[in-house]
Amino acid sequence: MPAEKIDTLVVGAGQAGVAMSEHLSRHGIPHLVLERDRIAERWRTGRWDSLVANGPAWHDRFPGLEFTDTDPDAFPAKERIADYFVDYAKKIGAPIRCGVEVTSVERKAGAPGFRVETSQGPIEALNVVAATGAFQTPVIPSLVPQDTSVTQIHSFDYRNPGQLPAGAVMVVGAGSSGAQIAEELLGSGRRVYLSVGPHDRPPRAYRGRDYCWWLGVLGKWDVEAMEPGKEHVTISVSGAHGGHTVDFRRFAAQGMTLVGRTQKFENGVLSFAPDLADNLAEGDAYYLWMLKEADAWAERNGMDLPEEPEAYVIGPDPDCVTDPILSLDLAEAGVTSIVWATGYSRDYSWLKVDTFDAQGVPRHQRGVSLEPGIYFLGLPWQSRRGSTFIWGVWHDAKHVADHIATQRSYRQYRGPAEREAEDAKSSTAAE
Ligand SMILES: Cc1cc2nc3c(=O)[nH]c(=O)nc-3n(C[C@H](O)[C@H](O)[C@H](O)COP(=O)(O)OP(=O)(O)OC[C@H]3O[C@@H](n4cnc5c(N)ncnc54)[C@H](O)[C@@H]3O)c2cc1C
């Protein structure tokens, strides 16, 4: 089958692929976006039923379109977010082809560009943008064998409490997913254990402003790299029920049992690191640091925002923190299921080019890979903290499109002799 030819091929039509299309169009670069499912599929079918955006509608969007039917301070439901990207793609006339999977991308030998194999035939492209995001393959640590009697699912496959067998639930991971799922399960009347690792826990709102606004004015979304010696930790936030601060002590007061990081499983017994108090203390430190930064900013800028001194009060540690459980016999505790809210890894097995390190991590600068013509979008910390989020990816897409446009202009350059030859050719043709 003869290969279809295109300047730039974008793989994936989540928010990253849609943003990429907008910026490529602005440069007038011919492109095609291939999506194996539907536009923004992950928002539709890769999340639990009750999920809403972690940020308010005025914030979690692209600059070119507002959520017209949603209060700007409300948190849109996941389906609404998926619809938003479908509407956005329509508005910008994005050339998206759904139901087409890219199965391999390889550099052409002795010619510019790449040979792309897809489920609907080959394509040749000068550039390929991998806009497949940071949340590709759910990761479950290999701790509890699959053949134990306990049901195990990843947060990717969690839908609602009714899906789990009767009994207590162990939720592992206290980022936004783990915290929100654990809270939902507790609210449904389940007995819940929550394994809490390191996390950042911002206040949902402070002095009348959402934390998204505070991180914006404080320049924290734009921080380009983690502090040296620090590892990336997840932000634990929730837009559920109109949005509220994730407060693990409140969860405990409502009956949830908190434990430290899950470490081992042996003979039906899960063991936890003795780090629960430290993890909570670090989450609190981040929370208090944000309040102080916000106060300092308000004062420096003479902003007359309502004072909120009570926000500084952190409640007493519950018993499960002062006297932590270090091991739990799952059968004795009536735990019949485990929800692993333990994050995602990448899958670039289809991208057969030379820009990955030994661990398969893309090597790149702000999405521009080491293999000329190959680009990434939606990676964690691609250019800044906000890179994996809706508003952040739009800015990264602009940078990637600018780079592609610059490279095109180099490729289109003709030296004096070539220009002379072309001029001669066109004047002969005109005679
Ligand atoms: C539970 C959860 C909640 C989140 N909530 C928020 C939030 O409230 N606000 C926010 O800003 N961010 C949020 N995020 C982060 C981020 O915005 C989302 O994960 C978002 O879906 C990432 O978009 P993306 O386009 O980078 O990747 P994805 O949405 O994963 O899109 C990638 C697309 O690529 C397609 N694809 C993959 N491989 C191929 C292939 N080989 N060929 C063709 N197509 C392919 C997939 O089908 C998919 O549609 C959340 C993330 C998670 C996991």
Image (cartoon, grey):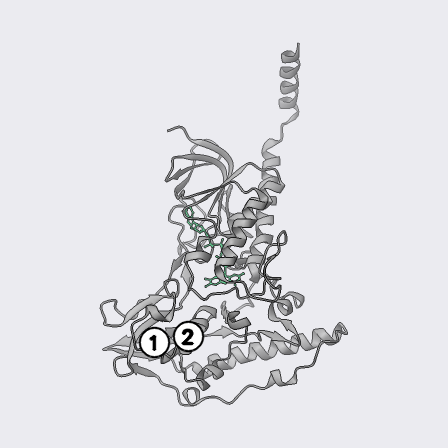
Q: Is residue 29 above or below residue 143?
A: above
Distance from the alpha carbon under mark 1 to that under mark 2? 8 Å
Q: Is residue 361 above or below residue 286?
A: above
Residue at image coords 36%, 85%:
325
Residues under numbered marks 1 and 2 in contact, where contact means CB atoms less than 8 Å apart: yes
Residue 170, quarter of picture = bottom left
Q: Can the viewer see residue 374 in this picture?
A: yes
Residue at image coords 61%, 82%:
311
Residue at image coords 58%, 37%:
29
Q: What kind of residue is marked 2?
A: Ala
Q: Earlier in the sequence, mark 1 or mark 2?
A: 1
Q: How many marks?
A: 2
Label 2: state its secondary structure.
helix
Q: Position of residue 406 (x, y in %)?
A: 61, 40
* Marking on residue 169: 1
Residue 273, quarter of picture = bottom left
Q: Is residue 107 above or below residue 357?
A: above
Q: What kind of residue is marked 1?
A: Val
The residue positioned farthest toward the front in the image shown: 69
Crowding at mark 2 (Cα within 10 Å: few <14, some 14-19, many 20+): many
Tell whether circle 1 marks a residue whose Cβ is less than 8 angstroms from ligand 1.
Answer: no
The residue carrying mark 2 is 182
Quick check: 15 left or right of 342? right
Q: Position of residue 249 (x, y in %)?
A: 48, 84
Q: Nearer the viewer, residue 380 or 424?
A: 380
